[in-house]
Image: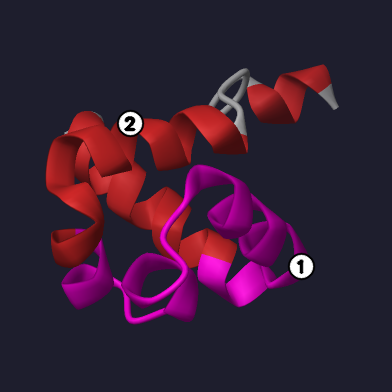
Amino acid sequence: MVEQQKNNPLHGITLEKVVTDLHAHYGWEKLGLLIKIDCFINNQSIKSSLKFLRRMPWARKKVEDLFLETFHK
């Protein structure tokens, strides 16, 4: 398992850090335009975003992909 994580750029980065960094970089409005999920458009908070993203793997993947595209080029 450790061998698989070696090439994972998200290894050791929490979902909270991902959402917090994206929010700081883009703000809620731009995040809502980039990824059209309700927690970025209407119920804008780190807590509600984390709750939603932990339950919806497809949304979490979009957020993690945006994080990598933004900060790990």
Residue at the disc numbered 2: 21
Looking at the image, which residue is at 40% across and 34% down? 20
Q: Which amino acid does the dot numbered 1 rest on?
A: Arg
In terms of image quadrants, where is residue 5?
top right
* Disc 2 residue crowd, few under 14, some 14–19, many 20+, Cα 10 Å: some
Task: Identify the main secondary structure in magenta.
Answer: helix
Extreme residue toward the right, this view? 1
Q: 29 left or right of 62?
A: left
Looking at the image, which residue is at 44% across and 42% down? 19
Marked residue nearer the N-terminal end (1 or 2): 2
Figure check: 20 above or below 34: above
In terms of image quadrants, where is residue 36?
bottom left
Q: Is residue 8 visible?
A: no
Q: Position of residue 12 (x, y in %)?
A: 62, 18
Q: Position of residue 8 (x, y in %)?
A: 55, 31
Q: Position of residue 18 (x, y in %)?
A: 45, 36
Quarter placement of the C terminus: top left
Q: Secondary structure at mark 2?
A: helix
What's the CA distance linking mark 1 and mark 2? 20 Å
Residue range (magenta): 31-59
Q: Position of residue 13 (x, y in %)?
A: 56, 23
Figure check: 28 above or below 13: below
Instruction: Please say whether residue 5 is one of the residues in the magenta stretch.
Output: no
Residue at the disc numbered 1: 55
Q: Is residue 40 visible?
A: yes
